[in-house]
Amino acid sequence: MDIKKRIKELQDELINLRRDFHQYPELGFEEFRTNKVVREYLAGCGLEVETVAKTGVVALLRGGLPGSTVMLRADMDGLPVREENDVPYKSLNEGKMHACGHDGHMAMLLVAAKILSEMSRDIAGNIKFVFQPNEEDAGARIMIDEGVMENPKVEAVFGIHLWTPLKSGQVGIAGGAVMAAHENFQLKIKGKGGHSGTPQTAIDPILAAAGVIQAVQVIQTREIDVLKPTLIIFGKIQGGTAPNIIPASVEIEGSIRYLYDGNDDSEEQPKRRLERVIQRTCEAYRADYELKFIPSNPPLINDETLADMVKKVGEQVVGRDRIVPYVCMPGEDFAEFQREAPGVFYFVGVGDREKETEYPHHHPRFNIDEDMLSLGVEMHVRTALDYLAKVK
């Protein structure tokens, strides 16, 4: 099969799929319409299809020849964002939007599944097409617990993220750690309420919260090696009911990200350092605290050998000059799949200022350069074929 020619023949179908998903975004574990569209398309390709993890979809292609099993993954969920783009395919679900490219991810993988199914007789091995729900809040582990990596056992995993920080046509690939571990935290600072006219009778948790936020910066800038990136960001502060009342407590939420193994036994110990600063700062302000960590995903670490393989595929698809090393600090729970099997997660650039697709992910004006969807399809197809050909 002439893969490029077949992708070109399916170009309109590819874009129409993406736009349909874009118009009907659904939040994590609410992707019921999306599930139906994906299942019906994959069944039409003659694949074995099942629902996993409530709204996720897994389809299996059994090749005509014996071999290994490779997994290709796309994510399904939208975000609670009100879209501000003025486009014909604007979100019809108020307050929800595909502001992270997952609509494009699904469209690319569906068309790749169709093309690969047309080649199944000559494929040595199996291909699992995994459509994951709730990526924004750690849905991968649930799919794993429900057996997505088994029957047949997956031996390598690959995923693509459409990425506006990269120029259209670039492909970002690197071995090693390429996306950060991510944990959210919830902090409650407990003081003693009182009248703002007699602050000496109260213990002000707002003042303690300000002290904590300032003091925590020392961890990132003075305690951990700058070559081991660490981010501690406060995203939400809530407390108080009136300007003349000192509240009894303040609630703070934030995130911590790092590009290394940040467990309690590691040299960096970011979570232990965070709690140490919180504890001693609260003591200085005579306040108490409660701290809870909410794990999202570990660091995403690409297999070096497979990353080299994907680079060679990329050179074939876009040329060597468009392959760039790329590392960033957002989290991605594809990392959970990589704990079960070696794999590579990489980026296809869709940023084009003239097409107004340069806005960052999760922005209400986020959009993608649709001309790059075919590039992602070709990367999926050739990566799966190359891997299976090498390990058969």
Image (cartoon, helix red, strand yellow):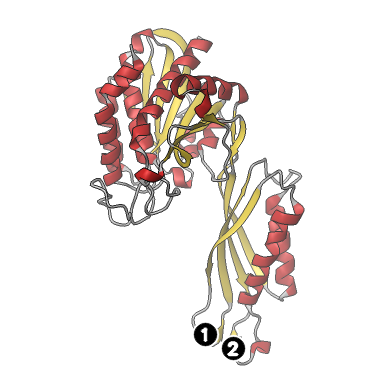
Q: Residue at x 38, y 32 (%)?
A: 372
Q: Which residue is drawn at 45% across and 29% down?
A: 148
**135 shown above or below 249:** above
Give the residue type that dot 2 points to: Ser
Give the image quarter of residue 31. Answer: top left
**245 shown above or below 298:** below
Give the residue type that dot 1 points to: Pro
- Residue at the extreme bottom of the image, as rendered: 197
- Count up the numbered dots: 2
Tag 1, which secondary structure?
loop
Q: Is residue 72 left or right of residue 231?
A: left
**195 shown above or below 167:** below
Q: If you read the primary sequence from the N terminus, does the residue marked by circle 1 or circle 2 appear first?
A: 2
The image shows residue 353 at horizontal and vertical percentages of: 40, 45
Task: Determine whether label 1 and label 2 are within 8 Å by CB.
Answer: yes
Q: Name the residue under label 1.
A: 243
Q: Which residue is drawn at 62% across and 25% down?
A: 304
Give the image quarter of residue 185. Answer: bottom right
The image shows residue 325 at horizontal and vertical percentages of: 58, 32
Tag 2, which secondary structure?
loop
Q: Mark 2 points at which residue?
A: 196
Q: Residues within 10 Å of mark 2 (few under 14, many from 20)?
A: some
The image shows residue 253 at horizontal and vertical percentages of: 55, 61
